[in-house]
Image: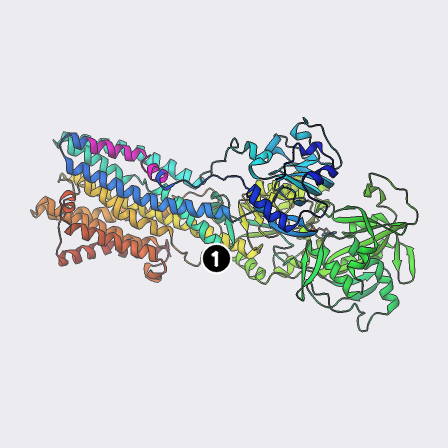
């Protein structure tokens, strides 16, 4: 077994010997053996809360304390049956709560597990993608900006590598790394610049490193136990509901105390009054609300996962529902991110066409209506070779199928080379790479220097605006000439206006070259020869058009933020129909020139932000929010993190997104489709509506009971229900069916309404109207019914028995009212929410079962009821459906 001590003090040679590795990595066989020796490269994660803990948590509730004290009081007063019953109800309540919550907990945990980290390693000289948990010491890991470092690495190569190690050192500035250095053994963690530590984030550059330790042996592993797992924050809605429940509780404790006083003055026994007060408080206080909300949100999370949206932070579900704007990336989100070069334009207004699409390098470069001459192809050669040299991707043929690894833009150049009869491997064999500037979005170009037979060649490709100022010559069909930027710009604009992504290429050759150690390429990027332009297409995803339409009908504004050329961006935005005037396009450089106070307005007007540097994205998002938008923002790069954090909803791309983006985002879109964001918004809206439905049910039925009791006191008749009956009604029967509402599948019109205003109250006017109407109608009918029974001389226990059944039926029927705020209950398919249907029927059957169960029926003070009576009560209960149907009709 190998052990690498103080790897930062070793030289690169020593690290290879110590780890028995090489510049090609270790072999697969050794990796397999070492995985057995060292175990998986993982840190123990916080386990999901156990069932027992969840069960225990059910009793940590002031209301439960009150009930407990009440039952103990009953015991001391010799009333065992009440005490036993309260105990039983509490138990059932806790069991229901546990089942619901542990389900929610499990799915939340499962969702988090879905985003495993993948890293790139080289084994036997072959680069592959690997789940980081399989990494072993000696593995050769490739790093690029946006990666999360998967294990502790001794760097053997670094290029402009900067790593954010704040997790370990608290230092928020990224550290510049240098593979070539070695340090004293006692050097502080933050100064070991030849190391990359597990868990830190690559913010810039590229690097290669040998794994020195994995799992718990890494620097992160050593402090893992002291790292506080950040508690999952509660969704703001749940916090609001908890606060609301508390306020309502205080209010009703006061009212109940008042009622209790009246009852005591009327000469009722104080034990009975106490029990009743407790029961009344239970009816009025919607203690099940926060739990039901959490469940509704977690169900939404599960549904979103089915639609390729992974919720990393539960509050995002609610936030997504109130999005008024989506600021999206173009490449890869609206489009498929599969670039195909379709045209080559070289100086002198010469255009070549390139057939084919995708990664299959078939087809020949040709002229408009004839094949290209061989001299012309020869002239294209420097351009094609530049595209190959200045390239980080790999195109391979496996079992007859062409596969690409790496950047889509880079790949398109490899495909192009084949089509122009340039074999990339041959080119790369001939030239030796000296140094390179890898592509980073903020640069908008990539460059490389190679050596060949004594000469040195600089190759560069990237945005036209970036390259032209560096060139002084251009290569035409008749040889080099002084550059004519005006014509080239015109050519580029024309291509961009047609929706092509346009890249320029340039190079320069040194016949004699002074070796310099540092090899700062930037120093050589001048007096280049412009070689030509390429125009590539990146087709729209097939579901983008539909999704954009859905956004528009849902009242959600769209903005595109891209690093691409304004004309290209506009062409795509207008094809999608969310921009119609070039004035709606603003570029990053233009924005920089505007004065600060005007920027917010300018940003508010724009639909397309082009040539935006990643750092500017933050400002754009900030301004949009300042303008009152509730913004969802997509991002994939290392530099998108601040914007993702700033956004109301930060969305990372699952496939193309970097680890950095994924770790900061609230949501991850697993398939990178824009359409999935829209699906998420739809689910978010459904979740919010379902929450309203639960709130309506719980509050209105609770209020109805309060109305019934207050009227009875005023009418000076006995209490309509006993304490245990009220508990049964609220915690058991209603407690079973209310959760069903959280499973409502949505009414289908969620995306045809404007977004709800953020901060809009749940208790808006329609909600209050419906609650008051329901409570009054239900309360009055049950009161008059009970009043009638008592006045006609019915025995009080039987009268209560019937009234309780009526209330249970009322609550069953109420479910039908709750399913839509505006639509008729009859227009909704009862079978599209089976949990709700069976929950409601189950609640009724349970109650009927109890009527016939000896023992329990005695405690509950209930007895069987004739079928005729049951039908009569059902008829009475249906009144609430009729009333609400009429109300909805008027509202419509
Ligand atoms: P987007 O927002 O569409 O993802 P990028 O930031 O990827 O835009 O690209 C911005 C610009 O950088 C492109 O218009 C192009 O000119 C240039 N560019 C993109 N990819 C590469 C690459 N691999 N090599 C060189 N230049 C590139
Ligand atoms: Mg890009």
Q: In the figure, 571 relative to 721: above or below?
A: below
For label 1, the residue is 752
Relative placement, left or right, of 255 versus 789 is right
Relative placement, left or right, of 192 versus 35 is right
Crowd band around label 1 with a 10 angstrom C-alpha radius: few (<14), some (14–19), many (20+):
some
| Residue at horizontal 74 percent and vertical 62 percent from the top | 415
| Residue at horizontal 61 percent and vertical 59 percent from the top | 577
Q: Would you say residue 493 is visible in this rendering? A: yes
Q: Report the span colored magenta.
A: 53-72
In-front residue for pair 338/566? 338
**Residue 693 placement (x, y as % from top left):** 36, 49
Q: Would you say residue 664 is visible in this rendering? A: no
**Residue 41 placement (x, y as % from top left):** 57, 42
Could you tell me what secondary structure mostly forms the magenta stretch?
Answer: helix
**Residue 790 placement (x, y as % from top left):** 10, 45
**Residue 805 placement (x, y as % from top left):** 19, 50
Task: Using the rendered view, name the quadrant where residue 601 is placed.
Answer: top right
Relative placement, left or right, of 636 versus 78 is right
Task: Using the rendered view, name the quadrant where residue 386 is placed.
Answer: bottom right
């Amino acid at each position: 077994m190998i052990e690498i001590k103080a790897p930062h003090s070793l030289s690169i040679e020593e690290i290879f010997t110590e780890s028995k590795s090489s510049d090609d990595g270790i072999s697969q066989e050794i990796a397999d053996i070492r995985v057995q020796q060292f175990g998986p490269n993982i840190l123990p994660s916080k386990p999901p809360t156990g069932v027992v803990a969840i069960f225990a948590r059910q009793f940590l509730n002031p209301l439960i304390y009150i009930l407990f004290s009440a039952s103990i009081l009953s015991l001391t007063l010799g009333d065992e049956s009440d005490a036993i019953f309260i105990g039983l109800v509490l138990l059932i309540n806790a069991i229901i709560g546990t089942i619901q919550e542990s389900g929610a907990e499990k799915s939340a945990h499962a969702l988090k597990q879905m985003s495993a980290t993948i890293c790139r390693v080289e084994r036997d000289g072959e680069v592959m993608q690997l789940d980081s948990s399989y990494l072993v010491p000696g593995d050769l890991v490739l790093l690029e900006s946006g990666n999360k470092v998967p294990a502790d690495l001794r760097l053997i190569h670094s290029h402009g590598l900067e790593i954010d190690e704040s997790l370990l050192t608290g230092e928020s500035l990224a550290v510049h790394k240098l593979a070539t250095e070695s340090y004293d053994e006692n050097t502080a963690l933050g100064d070991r610049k030849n190391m990359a530590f597990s868990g830190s984030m690559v913010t810039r550059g590229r690097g290669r490193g040998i794994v020195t330790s994995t799992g718990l042996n890494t620097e992160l592993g050593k402090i893992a136990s002291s790292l506080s797992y950040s508690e999952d924050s509660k969704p703001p809605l749940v916090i609001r509901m908890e606060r609301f429940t508390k306020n309502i509780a205080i209010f009703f404790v006061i009212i109940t105390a008042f009622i209790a006083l009246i009852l005591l003055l009327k000469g009722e026994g104080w034990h009975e009054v106490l029990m009743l007060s407790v029961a009344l408080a239970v009816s009025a206080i919607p203690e099940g609300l926060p739990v039901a909300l959490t469940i509704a949100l977690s169900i939404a999370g599960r549904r979103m996962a089915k639609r390729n949206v992974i919720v990393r932070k539960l509050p995002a579900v609610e936030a997504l529902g109130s999005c008024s704007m989506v600021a999206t990336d173009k490449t890869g989100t609206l489009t498929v991110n599969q670039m195909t070069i379709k045209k080559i334009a070289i100086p002198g207004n010469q255009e070549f066409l390139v057939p084919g699409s995708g990664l299959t390098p078939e087809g020949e470069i040709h002229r408009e209506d004839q094949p290209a001459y061989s001299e012309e192809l020869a002239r294209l050669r420097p351009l094609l070779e530049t595209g190959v040299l200045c390239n980080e991707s790999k195109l391979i043929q496996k079992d007859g199928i062409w596969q690409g690894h790496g950047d889509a833009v880079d790949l398109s150049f490899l495909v192009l080379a084949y089509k122009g009869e340039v074999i990339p491997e041959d080119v790369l064999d001939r030239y030796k790479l000296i140094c390179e500037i890898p592509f980073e979005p903020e640069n908008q170009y990539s460059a490389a220097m190679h050596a060949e037979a004594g000469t040195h060649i600089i190759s560069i490709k990237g945005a036209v605006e970036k390259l032209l100022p560096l060139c002084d010559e251009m290569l035409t069909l008749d040889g080099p000439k002084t550059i004519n930027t005006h014509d080239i710009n015109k050519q580029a604009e024309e291509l961009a206006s047609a929706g092509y992504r346009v890249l320029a290429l340039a190079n320069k050759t040194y016949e004699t070259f002074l070796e310099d150690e540092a090899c700062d390429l930037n120093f050589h990027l001048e007096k280049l020869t412009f070689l030509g332009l390429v125009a590539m297409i990146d087709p729209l995803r097939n579901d983008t058009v539909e999704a954009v339409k859905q956004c528009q009908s849902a009242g959600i504004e769209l903005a595109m933020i891209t690093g691409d050329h304004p004309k290209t961006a506009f062409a795509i935005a207008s094809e999608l129909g969310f921009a119609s005037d070039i004035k709606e396009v603003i570029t990053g450089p233009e924005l920089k020139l505007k004065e600060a106070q005007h920027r917010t307005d300018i940003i508010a007007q724009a639909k397309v932000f082009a040539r935006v540097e990643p750092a500017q994205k933050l400002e754009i998002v900030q301004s949009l929010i300042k303008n009152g938008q509730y913004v969802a923002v997509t991002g994939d790069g290392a530099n998108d993190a601040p914007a993702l954090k700033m956004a109301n909803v930060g969305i990372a791309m699952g496939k193309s997104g970097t680890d950095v983006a994924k770790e900061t985002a609230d949501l991850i879109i697993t398939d990178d489709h824009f359409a999935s964001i829209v699906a998420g918004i739809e689910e978010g809206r459904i979740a919010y509506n379902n929450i309203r439905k639960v709130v309506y049910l719980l509050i209105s039925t609770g209020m109805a009971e309060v109305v019934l009791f207050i009227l009875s006191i005023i009418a000076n008749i006995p209490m309509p229900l006993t304490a245990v009956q009220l508990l049964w009604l609220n915690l058991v029967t209603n407690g079973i069916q209310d959760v069903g509402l959280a499973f409502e599948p949505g009414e289908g019109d969620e995306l045809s309404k404007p977004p709800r205003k953020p901060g809009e109250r749940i208790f808006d006017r329609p909600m209050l109207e419906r609650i008051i109407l329901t409570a009054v109608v239900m309360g009055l009918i049950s009161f008059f019914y009970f009043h009638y029974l008592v006045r006609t001389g019915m025995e009080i226990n039987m009268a209560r028995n019937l009234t309780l059944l009526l209330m249970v039926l009322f609550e069953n029927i109420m479910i039908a009212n709750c399913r839509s705020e505006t639509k008729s209950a009859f227009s909704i398919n009862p079978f599209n929410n089976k949990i709700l249907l069976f929950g409601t029927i189950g609640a009724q059957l349970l109650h009927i079962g109890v009527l016939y169960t000896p023992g329990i029926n005695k405690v509950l003070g209930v007895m069987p009821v004739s079928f005729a009576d049951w039908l009569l009560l059902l008829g009475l209960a249906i009144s609430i459906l009729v009333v609400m149907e009429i109300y909805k009709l008027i509202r419509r």
